Every structure is written in structure tokens, then in C-alpha cells.
Amino acid sequence: MSKRLYVVAGELSGDAHGAGLLRSLKTMLPAVEIHGVGGPEMASVAGPGLRDWVEDAAVMGVWEVLKRYGWFKQRFAEMLAELKTFRPDVLLLIDYPGFNLRFAEAVKRECPETRLVYYISPQVWAWHKGRIPKMARMLDEMLCLFPFEQRIFESAGLKTTFVGHPLVDELQENRLPNAVRDDSLVGLFPGSREREVARLLPMMIESAKLLRAWRGDLNFEVPAASVKLAAQIRQLLVAANADSWIMVTAGGSHALMQRACCAVIASGTATLEAACYGLPYCLVYRVAPLTYLLGRILVKIENIGLVNILAGERVIEEFVQADAEPTAVSRSLRGFLESPEKRAALQARLAETAAKLGDAGTHERAARAVHAWLL
């Protein structure tokens, strides 16, 4: 009898990491039957049993989720019904904690025989430590990406494996041979969600205008996470009269991280990717005021940037909410453009921090852990 896996990922980053895990798992267990939801990369590996829903599911912020509560409630019910019919041996939850932790609770109640494995641990150590004991009772194993997370979850009694960060493998595959940085190229990375792009890109464009007024030979590029986002970005550039001098590409973010002199990047996985590639950058973060207010109450850490959290100190500049404005951001980028020494010093600190993400082989280690529960 073939083994069955149900998997849930709700964002593009989770889709990429999930695809790597599933690819490795299928080499270990070719007959595994996979159902669930994810993105285009996971769907291409898993086959017809996995639906691509990330463009609709990848929303960020309390207010944004509340506005689409009915849609999420319907998907939740459909997926739970599908899982109860499918009866998987293992439920693999990839990141996406707002949905996945609730789904895990429902599955634990409705299908207690299904083993629950969580890949890419939710950052509850930052925003909701009270959830950790509940997760320890609910989950069978946590697969974490950062070394400090293992101690946190194990101390609550949850079986935890530090598998390393999948970015180490994925970025190595996309490393350009003999890449040379262009001293006049600035990268603008506004995020992978439509609302995030709408909130951050106009500010980035204004920052670019200030830099261009200072130095007319500068070039700017925006890599869009999808074709749909590329169209949205072009509309924003046209509205700002910047479409003739800011280039947009569908994809290509990793190449740009290796070619640009410096960049401004939306808080998220891209900031870790930039660190691994040694790209000097500053971080920007803006969400709806209600979301930020709730976050300030819940979040108990000093920095929001993943690189700063991993380093345990402020390595890169963070511009949050009202501080994420054109004058401050352009000043930060100008510092990189004016000083090769400043760029080199930050690159050395980024390399030191990125080394904490572990060795290559993350997908295989994570797949091995899932495989053990399928046997």
C-alpha cells in the first residue's frame, strides 16, 4: 500500500522550499501519493493531487486576513474534508502559521492517526511564546531552519530537528559564475505580495528619484515575483513617471542580488537571500496601522530583520512604518554608493551571519525526517 502525504504551503517562499523537500522525498519514496495545496513549483513536483493557490492565499497582516475571512474559512473546510477522505499518513505544514496552526489543530482532532510535521517553524519565539506548549502537544516533529530555534522548541518537549536553511541549497544553484557588481545599479525589492508592493514600491520609486537627482548615471531594477506582479509594478511606475528609467523583470531576483551595487529590500526571506549573496542593503517594513499596533504588543524582539535576529545584533539598517520614507532610504543607499569601504565591511558581516544558516543538503535532511514518519 502506497504511503500518503498531505501538504500545505501558502506563500511563494514556502512553495520553493516545499518543492525541494518533495523532490528529495520522491527519490526516497517514489510511490508516495501527495495531495494538498501549495504553489506552482510544488504542483510540478507533486502532480495533480496538489493545487496551486498561493497567489490568492499569500496575504499579510491582520486587517488583510480579516477582509478575506470568508474565503479562508471556505478553503479551510474544503481542505479538511479532502484530508479526511484522503487519510494521509503524514500532514506536512510548511510555514504559513496563521492558517497552518489552526489547520493542525483541526486535523489533530478529526484525524488523530495522522502524524503532524511542521517545516519552517513559525516565529512564535518572537510574537507568541505562549503558543509553544500547545504546539508541543499538537505536533509530532518540528523541522527548524535556525539553530537557536531547536533549543526553544525542545525545551517545551517537542521533537525538533535543525535541518539548516533551504536557501543555502537554492541560492547555490542560482549563483552566477564570475558575477561582477555594477557600481551604478541599485535593486528595488518591494516584496512578493500585491498589497506589500502597493505599500512599499511608491516609496522606493521616490527614493530612486532622489538618488537619480544626485547621480544621473544610476540604473534601477525591480524583480517581480510573478508575471501578475510585474504588471502591477509597471502600472505603479507609469503613475510615478518612472517607467522609462526603472526596469522591471518577471523573476530574476537572485541574479539582481549578485549584480547590484546595493538595494532596498522589503522585510522577509529576500533579506536572507541578499545576505547569502553578499548584497549590501537596507530593510523596509510597512503594514496596516492596526497590524503594526497589534504586532508591537505581541512581538518581543528588538529587530525585525531576519539577518539582525540571526546575528543577535543590528547588522543592517531597518526602516519601519513611518521611518520607511524616501529621504531616509535614499540616504542609506547613498552611503553604499559613495563608499566601497562601507560596502565591503557590511559584506563581511553578512557572510559571517549567513554561515549560521548551516551546510548544503537541507532539502534532503528535511525529506529524511518526513520519510521516517511515513515508514
Image: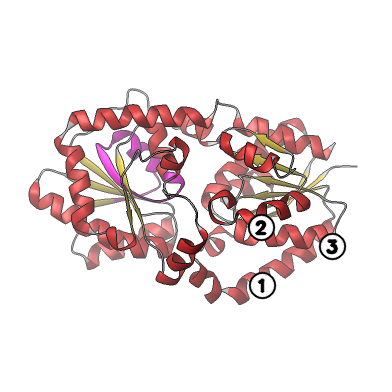
Amino acid under label 1?
A: Lys
Disc 2 and disc 1 in contact, CB within 8 angstroms: no
Count of numbered circles in the view: 3
Q: Nearest the camera: 45 or 163?
A: 163
Q: Furthest residue to the right?
A: 1
Amino acid under label 3?
A: Glu
Cα gap from disc 3 to disc 2, whole angstroms = 15 Å
In terms of image quadrants, where is residue 174?
A: top left
Depth check, mark 2 against mark 1: the one in front is 2
Image-based side of 297 in relation to 21, left or right: left
- In percent of width and height, residue 167 lies at 51, 36
- In percent of width and height, residue 339 lies at 16, 33
Say which residue label 3 marks: 110
Say which residue label 2 marks: 100
Could you tell me which residue is drawn at 60 percent across and 31 percent down? 362
Dot 1: within a 10 Å radius of its alpha carbon, few (fewer than 14), some, or many (20 or more) residues? few
Examine the structure image and report whether residue 255 is included in the region drawn in magenta. yes
Q: Earlier in the sequence, mark 3 or mark 2?
A: 2
Magenta stretch?
Answer: 248-270
Cα gap from disc 3 to disc 1, whole angstroms = 17 Å
Q: Earlier in the sequence, mark 3 or mark 1?
A: 1
Amino acid under label 2?
A: Asn
Q: Earlier in the sequence, mark 2 or mark 1?
A: 1
Q: Nearest the camera: 261 or 333?
A: 333
Say which residue label 1 marks: 73
Cα gap from disc 2 to disc 1, whole angstroms = 13 Å
In terms of image quadrants, where is residue 84?
A: bottom right
Could you tell me which residue is drawn at 83 percent across and 51 percent down? 114
- In percent of width and height, residue 125 lies at 57, 49
Image-based side of 281 in relation to 4, left or right: left
Dot 3: within a 10 Å radius of its alpha carbon, few (fewer than 14), some, or many (20 or more) residues? some
